[in-house]
Amino acid sequence: MELWIPITIGAAFLQNLRSATQKHLKTVMGTTGATFVRFGFGFPFALAFVALLHWSAGYPLPSLNGTFFAWAGLGALGQIAATFLLIHLFSFRNFAVGTAYSRTEPAQAAIFALVFFGERASLGTVAAIAISVLGVMLISVAHVAVSLRSMVMSTFSRNALIGLASGTAFGVSAVSYRAASLSLGGPNFVMQAAVTLAFVITFQTAIMLVWMLWKDRAEIGRIARAWKPSLFTGFVGATASFGWFAAMTLQQAAVVKSLAQIEMLFTFAATVFFFKEKITRLEIAGCVLIVGGILVLLAVS
């Protein structure tokens, strides 16, 4: 088994845990605050990862360059924009279709990687991405009266376009992070991922902090009062991101993001076994497709 595979699975599990804690935090703070904690409470851990690798493992710090700053900055802004668009969808009554289209991130990442870097995916990899993306889209619309025909017909609706834009920004972000990490050229994928993460998450923290100081200073107080769960959220979030960056340094971003759909299976496992909730047939079908896509991906990797 290639190393990027267990790294991606571990990152997906931690991201699922981070999402659960963020959902809890939204009961005591706004969406902006719950989003900020993944950055603001995560960047100290990201810096600690770099320090630990440098001082304890003896890995030298890579030399930063203009290419790195350009791709890392683009990735950071793309991730913020993608998250904003995704959250914006929740303000509409029927946001399911838009959310489903936002899940096309792996497919869009494959296109951007081909256009910008000439990275070609095998036919088996393309099939795996398509199967898993379809599975996630089915899950996204499982609780509303939406058919495959209506999803196709509504491709140019406002919600669908916002969702596609979110998926586009996530795709650009993933490809940019891979480019930034690879531009460092060493000393190894672990240190490259750690340095990329440290820069990106610090940059995002600064941007969001300035935004809150300008638009919603009261939110900062709500974040401060919930510092304990926020600290845990920051830790698991930073660790998950470190896993993503490491995996995407080793493998194409689209392939990593396709395998990352396994996060949905972790979510449903918690739903069924811990919260004793029932899932629909469409959700089961979506899970089966995700598993099928992952198996195809592993078979061709």
Image (spheres, grey):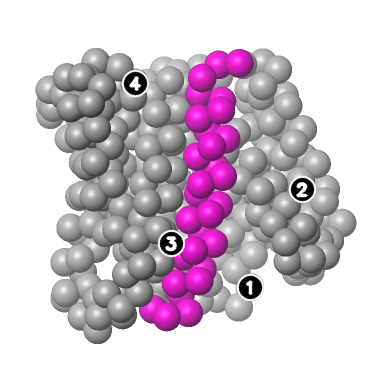
Residue under label 1 = 94
Residue contact between numbered discs 4 and 2, judged by CB atoms under 8 Å: no
Q: Earlier along the polypeptide chain: callout 4 or callout 2? A: 4
Number of residues whose C-alpha sits closer than 10 Å to that of mark 4, classed few (under 14), some (14–19) or many (20 or more): some
Residue 273 in picture, x, y percent from top left: 77, 58
Residue under label 4 = 189
* Callout 3 amino acid: Leu
Q: CA distance from mark 1 to mark 4?
A: 42 Å
Residue 203 in picture, x, y percent from top left: 20, 50
* Callout 1 amino acid: Asn
Q: Earlier along the polypeptide chain: callout 1 or callout 3? A: 3
Taking the image as shown, residue 300 lies to the left or right of residue 175, namely: right
Q: CA distance from mark 1 to mark 3?
A: 15 Å
Q: Which mark is residue 76?
A: none
**The magenta segment:** 1-29
Vertical placement of residue 264 versus 188, above or below: below
96 or 301, nearer to the observer:
301
Residue under label 2 = 286
Locate the C terminus and report the quarter of the image it occupies: top right
102 or 54, nearer to the observer:
54
Q: Earlier along the polypeptide chain: callout 3 or callout 4? A: 3
Q: Which circle, 2 or 1, is nearer the viewer? A: 2
Residue 21 belongs to magenta span: yes
Q: Residue at x 71, y 32 (%)?
A: 293
Residue lying furthest right in this view?
Answer: 281
Q: Earlier along the polypeptide chain: callout 1 or callout 4? A: 1
Residue under label 3 = 85
